[in-house]
Image (tube, grey):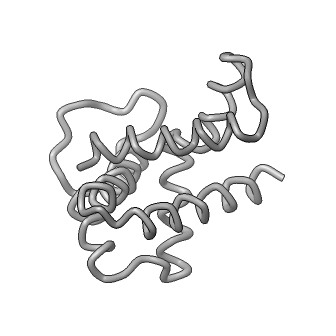
Amino acid sequence: MAYVGDAIYEIYIRDYLIERGETKPNKLHRAATHYVSANAQAYLVQKMLTENLMTKEEETFYRRGRNAKSHTSAKNADVTTYRVATGFEALMGYLHLSKQTKRLEELIEWCIQKVGEKND
């Protein structure tokens, strides 16, 4: 689920950045990193948990993804941050694969807003 969730979340972020007027590949990549990095995703999960934003079922899929045995290692984050980010991606993958598009888009919109607030 994390594999799919990573791709889906990144597509939504890329769409958002393009709609915002970012067109240069290097700027797009740097801007996207603020949203899709392991550190950003771990930050977003912590905010979701603090604000009780996830349903019980969503929390279950987040925790399952976070606790799953990883076959890759973190490049730019510590192991704990990487695992939390993997849980975030699993949640996105779960929502996408279970066709909960409205909820997926609701959470992604919330994530975009939170990252924007953090970077202001």
Q: As drawn, which residue projects farthest toward the right?
A: 120
Side (left or right) of 75 relative to 73: right
Q: Residue at x 48, y 30 (%)?
A: 76
Quarter-wise, where is residue 24 in the image? top right
Q: Is residue 111 above or below residue 1?
A: below
Q: Residue at x 84, y 53 (%)?
A: 120
- As rendered, which of 16 and 56 lies closer to the eye? 16
Quarter-wise, where is residue 32 in the image? top right
Q: Is residue 79 above or below residue 72?
A: below
Q: Residue at x 35, y 43 (%)?
A: 79
- Residue 98 horizontal/vertical position (percent): 24, 63
- As rendered, which of 40 and 100 lies closer to the eye? 100
- As rendered, which of 80 and 44 lies closer to the eye? 44
Side (left or right) of 29 relative to 107: right
Quarter-wise, where is residue 14 in the image? top right
Q: How many marks?
A: 0
- As rendered, which of 111 and 42 lies closer to the eye? 111
- Residue 48 horizontal/vertical position (percent): 51, 71
- Residue 68 horizontal/vertical position (percent): 18, 52
- Residue 106 horizontal/vertical position (percent): 53, 67
Q: Residue at x 56, y 69 (%)?
A: 47
